Image (spheres, grey):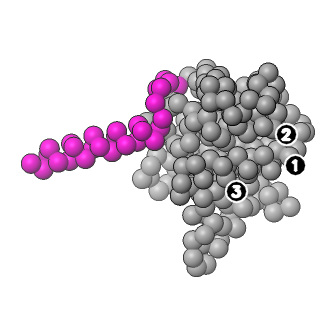
């Protein structure tokens, strides 16, 4: 009920203000479990996608959003719960992955939609990065749920990093692909080559839908490279 109320309070204004265009809504099943695997361009991705869907979709979010102290922290936690976000402790890479898998399976067992970003973090430059196989593929193979590739388009332009006010002149888009089935790999979720294959197949579809340039490294590594380059440039300019 709270999710429905938050959808009215937040989802409807988002649709009215930004008028996101959508292609492929017919690929979202009317009922039953499914995994929505999306590229990740902006913090707002987790709001734009639920805003255009009739069904509830649950994403995972940093545990810090739910544990901040004070009144502001409680309001933030209530907000994220209300929009269908689940807390995941990301203090350890393996622990975060296991928590994401358990959370995803629980959502799917209820016959609901589970949203996940295979890149693991937002793209630092608008390009599509290598998907991490630990979460998406393992949840897909363990649950047997179809994977629906989703491409968020221009959401990073709505509110660039560091900008307080969003750009209402930008009309973001969402392109939803046809469901991918991986029944042929049932029971093979411990095989890392199978996990890699499943993940790469999904990422290829996301690339095709989004039109993004694909980079075959993890986004976390790209962020480190960008930060190191910025540091070197700052040191060089100061010398």
Report the Cα–Cα distance between label 2 and label 1. Answer: 7 Å
Looking at the rendering, the stretch of residues picked out in magenta corresponds to 212-239
User: Which residue is the site of mark 1?
Assistant: 110
How many numbered marks, from 0 up?
Answer: 3
Around disc 1, counting alpha carbons within 10 Å, would you say few (fewer than 14), some (14 to 19), or many (20 or more)?
few
Main SS, magenta residues: helix
Q: Quadrant of residue 140?
A: top right
Query: Which residue is tagged 2?
Result: 33
Neighbour tally class for label 2: few under 14, some 14-19, many 20 plus, Cα within 10 Å: many
The image position of residue 30, as x and y in percent, is 89, 37
Helix, strand or loop for disc 3: strand
Q: Is residue 9 above or below residue 173?
A: below
Say which element carries label 2: loop
Q: Are marks 2 and 1 in contact (CB under 8 Å)?
A: yes
Confirm or deny contact between disc 1 and disc 3 (CB under 8 A).
no
Q: Give the distance between the C-alpha atoms of the residues marked 1 and 3, in whole angstroms.
A: 15 Å
The residue under the point 50% across, 47% down is 159
Please provide percent x and percent y for residue 217: 46, 30
Nearest the camera: 138 or 20?
Answer: 138
**Residue 101 shows in the view:** yes
CA distance separating discs 2 and 3 = 17 Å
Give the x, y percent position of residue 105. 78, 46
Which residue was labeled with disc 3?
Answer: 86
């Amino acid at each position: 009920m709270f999710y429905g109320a938050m959808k009215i309070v937040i989802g409807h204004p988002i649709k009215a203000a930004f008028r996101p265009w959508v292609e492929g809504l017919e690929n979202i099943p009317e009922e039953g479990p499914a995994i929505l695997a999306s590229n990740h361009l902006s913090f707002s991705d987790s709001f734009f996608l639920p805003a255009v869907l009739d069904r509830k979709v649950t994403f995972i979010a940093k545990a810090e959003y739910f544990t901040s102290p004070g009144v502001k922290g409680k309001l933030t936690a209530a907000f994220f719960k209300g929009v269908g976000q689940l807390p995941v402790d990301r203090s350890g890479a393996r622990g975060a992955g296991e928590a994401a898998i358990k959370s995803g399976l629980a959502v799917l067992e209820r016959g609901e939609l589970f949203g996940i970003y295979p890149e693991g973090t937002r793209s630092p430059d608008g390009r599509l990065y290598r998907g991490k196989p630990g979460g998406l593929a393992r949840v897909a193979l363990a649950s047997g749920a179809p994977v629906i590739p989703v491409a968020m388009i221009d959401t990073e332009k709505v509110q660039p990093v560091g900008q307080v006010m969003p750009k209402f002149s930008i009309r973001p888009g969402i392109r939803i692909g046809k469901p991918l089935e991986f029944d042929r790999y049932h029971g093979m979720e411990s095989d890392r080559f199978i996990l890699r294959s499943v993940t790469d197949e999904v990422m290829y579809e996301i690339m095709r839908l989004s039109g993004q340039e694909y980079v075959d490294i993890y986004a976390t590594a790209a962020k480190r490279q960008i930060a190191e380059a910025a540091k070197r440039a700052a040191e060089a300019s100061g010398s």
